[in-house]
Amino acid sequence: MTPLLEIRDYTLDFQTRAGPFRALDGVSLAVAPGEVLGLVGESGSGKTTLAMAVMRHLAGNARERGGSIRFDGRELIGIAPAEVRALRGRRIGMVFQNPATSLNPTLTLGRQITEVLERHRGLSPRAAATEAVDWLGRVELRNPAALMRRDPHQLSGGEKQRVVIAATFAVHPDLILFDEPTTALDVITGARILELFRRLRAETGVTGLYISHDLAVVSRIADRVAVLRHGRLLEQAPAATLFHAPQNDYTRRLIASVPKPEHRLVQDTPGAEKILEADHLGVAYWRPRLFGRQIFVGVHDVTLDVRAGEILGVVGESGSGKSTIARALTGLAHATGEIRLDGALVGRMGRAYRRAVQIIFQHPDSSLNPRQRIGEILARPLRLYGGSPREIPDLLAQVHLPAEYAHRWPHQLSGGEKQRVAIARAFAARPRLVICDEITAALDVSVQAAVIELLLDLRRQHGTAYLFITHDLNLVRQIAHRLAVMQHGELVDLLGIDDLGSGRENAYTRALMEASPAPVG
Amino acid sequence: MSARWLLRRLLLVFYTLLVVSILVFAITQVLPADAAVTLLGENASVEALAAVRSRLGLNDPVWLQFWHWIAGVAQGNLGVSMRTGQPVGPTMLIALSRSLLLAVCSIGLMLVVAVPLGVLAALRRGKAADLGVGLVSYLGVSVPEFVTATVVLVVLADRLQWLPATGYVPLTENFWDGVRHLVAPVLTVSIVLVAHVSRMVRSETADVLSSDYVAAARLKGLSGRVVLLRHVLRNALLPVVTVVALDVGYLLGGIIVVEEIFAIPGIGRQLLVAIENRDLPAMQAGALIMAATYAFANFLADLAYAFLDRRIRYE
């Protein structure tokens, strides 16, 4: 069968001040009609650029250096803008990464679907509205007729993504490019969206190019998978073959770094001694109003403890209150209830408490002061907690960074390196408990694997306990001794890792587990 | 939009006006002006002055004077001018209508010019058109309005003799002559506003152009015109509503200079006259009316914003 989309030897540079940067280098791939090709790569691999090249939506500094992109037998490179507009949306649709930003905030949801129906299918406004309601129902949204008049901000992330999907599929395009459509959603929502894709695909027989950094997600949806790295296509194979018998070294490493829950990375059992106890912890956020306050509950009545050397995983959907716990335990949010350190009630969090309990944040970009060199960043906690700046090289060595990095600025480091600095800063205080708030969420899988390895290493050396907050259930099942499950600001389950799947877990915990993308293979 | 929201906004307007009225009253109290002396002149006898003071209630405690004044204001009675003996309310409102005519025309002309300029600059970012618009607007912002006014007068009224130099003719009296008298002041005021607002439109439009939803709209295959009109402009022009309302504040203050130069008997000029003559009731009324106009303009802007951006209503 002739492929619907065929890219051959496609090469693209971006003009930068430092000279041309090769974003795509001799990429060749083909997608047959009715097939879904997964395109996997880490950040900066060029996968989104490739999608934009197909859509003919390239940045002003992009220079195409050769090759061809053929769609339905027709060369796309060099076609006229009018022809491009005739393809976009009508024949090639696109589902974007972040539904929160890809919908126009000031247009009703209905309008954002009917506008494409009117343009591409030539429907009258009335017919377009009927069709749009029908599609909102087909993407399993409740009360579609009322939704037509609603605005994007009134919907949750998953619902918004369903609207985007409805608007894309409603035009009946031949090819749909999915650009990380579940990345911005939490596990359960993402799993339901994937389910919807599978159903719509079966119903419509649409061809797809599914771009993701997440091998587990791609393994669920794609027939074949292509691996992209630094703009080069390393490998292309049927999904099962690729995951079980990868040919390329990088692919092998990529697959190996995907967390597999059965593969425990921690074997020991922690002591029974409780370091930190939180009793009936509650946090309410509020917003001032003309008369009084509007109150939002962050977390409500959470009681948990962390034992010496223990890794306590905290999981839940976005907005479930995971990070609020971290903020309460570090004094960043005002909390009600009691916090005990080594059995003693903590009133004002003084130096002793802060020394014992440190925190690492999700985004090292915003948690490291951009105007301080790495050395200065590390020297402050060292001095504060009785150490000396002379220990900086040691500290850097512990997180496997060279001593010269002390003279560098944060922006000169990669994301993974920055997170290592943040880890070093937390360990400068020689803490007994480190709260890790989604610290690998912004990192690529291979970098994530290395950071986790480092954390476990440090724990072996210092006996540090971790409160490990994450939405990645597969990852946390590899390392946690116990698991705290949050939903709507409440702790719904607190159980030993061995109790998972034993039937002793809460129904919500089970749902969360089932929604987690099965790891590769 | 919910009735509660509307009510809260209205309450806020009244609250603002209450605070302003207290301030205005307090300021006129500490001014070194004796109303009785203002009325009767420097040479009046002590007895006459005392009689006037007791007739006007100037010997009452301050809070009682304030109460009398604010109670009058609530009933629409802003007091009697010490200079002319006429009620100040109607005088000030007529003056306000002239100023508002000037302000509304200036804002209208400004919008017609500034919005296309700003959008054009954003679409041609970094190109000649953008730089041109930028240069013009920096000039407009940095040149004070008395200079702009002088230039307008010298060119249009003196050299070209197209327009009358100064003065004011009510539109109801002679429509065309009234319009001809308005052109020069409107031009002066709107040049400053255009400079200000076109910068704003440019940066807002540039932000929206680089947003995901505009990229999404393009990738949905919508035509360039639809993307610009439906997706870009609506979002880019929202903040302009707020800025225009804030500009009403500038207009009420800045327009004094323009009214003075072009001899338009607007509210700014009335206020100046009141201050020069130590005419306390007129000063109080003028300041309060200006504050009320400003508060009301912002209230309207809030309404317009909530109408255009439905996210606001739920906050």
Image: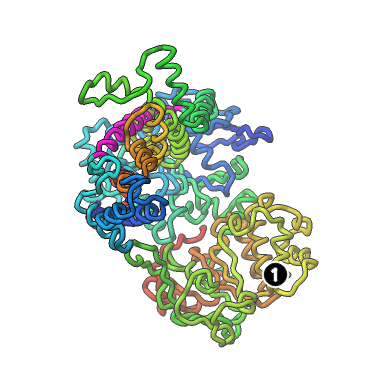
The x and y percentages for residue B45 are 33, 51
The kind of secondary structure the magenta stretch mainly shows is helix
User: Dot 1: what SS?
Assistant: loop
Please report the residue visible at 70 percent of the width from the left and 71 percent of the height from the top: A384
In the picture as drawn, the residue positioned furthest to the top comes out as B160
Q: Which residue is mark 1?
A: A428
The x and y percentages for residue A27 are 58, 36
Please report the residue visible at 31 percent of the width from the left and 46 percent of the height from the top: B40
Q: Which residues are magenta?
A: B91-120
The reply to whether residue B286 is in sight is yes
Position of B280 with respect to A272 (left or right) is left
Please report the residue visible at 68 percent of the width from the left and 65 percent of the height from the top: A424
The way the protein has been coloured in the rendering is rainbow
Magenta stretch contains residue B233:
no
Magenta stretch contains residue B119:
yes
The x and y percentages for residue A451 are 63, 62
The x and y percentages for residue B228 are 38, 32
The amino acid at mark 1 is Ala
The reply to whether residue B9 is in sight is no
For mark 1, does the 10 Å Cα neighbourhood hold few (<14), some (14 to 19), or many (20 or more) residues? many
Q: Looking at this view, is B183 or B267 the one in front?
A: B267
**Chain under label 1?**
A
Q: Looking at this view, is A393 or B241 the one in front?
A: B241
- The N terminus of chain A: image quadrant: top left
**Vertical side of A87 occupied by A451: above or below:** below
Position of A113 with respect to B275 (left or right) is left
